[in-house]
Amino acid sequence: MFEPNSLTRIIKEGESFFLTGHEDPDGDSLGAILGLYHLLKSMNKKVISAVHGPISRRLQFMDSEKTIIDLTSTSIPQDQFSHAIVCDSTSTKRTGKAEKIIKNADILVNIDHHPDNMKFGHVNFVNPDASSVCEMVFLLIHEQLFLPTKSCQALACGLLYDTGNLRNPNTSEKSLYTLALLAKRGVNIHILQKRLFANFTKEDFSRYSTGLEKARFAAEGKIIWTVLTGQGTKEITQRLIEELKNVKGVQVAILFVENNSNSTKVSLRSNSSFPVNDFAGRWGGGGHKQAAGMNIEFPWKKAVKTIIPQAVKELDEWNS
């Protein structure tokens, strides 16, 4: 077990920090990285933040100062940090090109809320009951350290993102308490909600509509699934699968996104106790019981033919 203020101690005692998260970063991972980055900068610490993969257009406003380096296009020295902090990643492998860098750190800190986290750090803060890593970071340090406004904004963004604008089941009393404290510190929650969830372009809306039109049912309506093909789909995947999940009678929603001709990203959501993280784990993926995903090295048509029958079989067994 860790002491409640041990993250604070690590931050105070460390001199140089490398911050990262999982590849293809989402709002929670970015929010935690940026929240810590601006805090460390305000304390005059040496700090660099980097992730594997560009930040999606939808989330670029979170890093308006472009402090986060994209490791797919830029390399950085691997031995200049005493501390590495990994946010929202179940394993070092999921950090992509950041893996070599974090393994060279004297102290590796792992902050995550996924139940299948591999506890890979020298110090592990893992709480599956937390709505988000941003919630965890704030509650671990806010009573001991002064958080600059930029940190508070980033952490609020991540919490809103991972709770689906406070609509997902992971929204808890602690989530609302954390958001209230961030609002008290000057964060305009309404503006962040608009920037995160009300920024559809015409092109996004067209692809979103196409995804809805292609939706199909399986397992007598207990499963709904659809496919997004072609480029430029990253911006709408979360909104689309959440909409599918809301269909009455659906227990599991599945979204197939074409990465390229030989690779497919599969996102899963559960409205029931069926653990989609266990299901995703069969293909090397993971996540939460009600929200998970994986990348599989199949073209999307083969992915559909493989995943849907297996999902039907396992869901029928689960319900019987």
Image: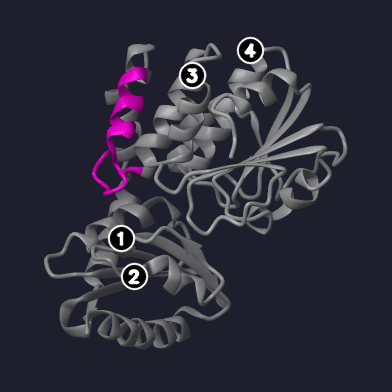
Residue shown at 44%/23% (left/top)? 153
Magenta stretch encompasses residue 168: yes
What are the residue bounds of the magenta stretch? 163-181
State left or right for residue 288 relative to residue 170: right
Categorize mark 2 by other alpha carbons within 10 Å: few (<14), some (14-19), many (20+). Answer: many
Q: Contact, CB < 8 Å: mark 1 with mark 2?
A: yes
Dot 2 falls on a residue whose secondary structure is strand
Nearer to us in this view, 231 or 24: 24
Colouring scheme, one of rainbow, by chain, secondary structure, one colour:
one colour
* Residue 306 drawn above or below residue 7: below
Can you tell which mark lies on residue 79? none
Q: Marks 1/4: CA distance? A: 38 Å
Q: Contact, CB < 8 Å: mark 1 with mark 4?
A: no
Q: Earlier in the sequence, mark 2 or mark 3?
A: 3
State left or right for residue 49 relative to residue 62: right
* Residue 2 drawn above or below residue 179: below
Quarter where residue 65 is shown: top right
Dot 3 falls on a residue whose secondary structure is loop
Give the image location of residue 214, x and y in percent: 26, 73
* Residue underneath mark 2: 254
- Mark 3 vs mark 1: in front: 3
* Residue underneath mark 4: 42
Can you tell which mark lies on residue 142? 3
Q: Earlier in the sequence, mark 1 or mark 2?
A: 1
Q: In the picture, which quadrant includes the N terminus? A: top right
Residue shown at 84%/44% (left/top)? 104
Give the image location of residue 223, x and y in percent: 24, 76
* Residue underneath mark 1: 241
